[in-house]
Image (cartoon, helix red, strand yellow):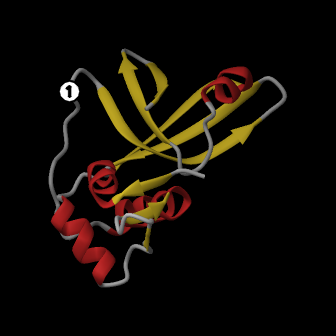
Amino acid sequence: MPSYTIGQAARLLGVSADTARRWADAGRIATHRDEGGRRLVEGVDLAAFSVELAQGGGENDVSYTSARNAFPGIVTAVKLGDVAAQVEIQAGPHRLVSLLTREAVEELGLEVGVQATARVKSTNVHIDRS
């Protein structure tokens, strides 16, 4: 399962690294330290926190926009069918849902906690693994 540094987690949550550190210090985000002393957040924990943050609002009520219609975020849910799949990404305050093939989900290695980018063009959403 992937882990993210505080800086990476902050970028995925759409806040500053200082805000993410304060949340970690306050116990809002569970962290652990690696051998080098860096503070890390497990992907599954970050996914759950990002959904909680988006639903409850945050201390930074900021309007977000996408550059080139790209929404970097974290996978919060994957529902696999026999042929099709549904993937949910939390990108800051935005929840994006995409329907794609099961094969694409497996090839990209998409699972809860994995960093991914949703790209929007017209009515289509494309998922890139970051």
Classify 62 as above or below 64. below
Residue drawn 51% across the image and 56% down it? 43
Instruction: Give the percent coordinates (x, y) of residue 87.
Output: 59, 37
- The residue tagged 1 is 67
**Would residue 15 be found to the left or right of residue 40 on screen?**
left
Residue farthest along the top direction in this orientation: 122
Amino acid residing under circle 1: Ala
Residue farthest along the bottom direction in this orientation: 26
Residue drawn 59% across the image and 49% down it? 112
How many badges with numbers are in the image?
1
**Would residue 126 be found to the left or right of residue 23 on screen?**
right
Instruction: Give the percent coordinates (x, y) of residue 11.
Output: 27, 49
Instruction: Give the percent coordinates (x, y) of residue 10.
Output: 27, 56
117 or 34: nearer the eye?
34
**Would residue 21 be found to the left or right of residue 50 on screen?**
left
36 or 122: nearer the eye?
36
The secondary element bearing badge 1 is classed as: loop
Residue farthest along the right direction in this orientation: 82
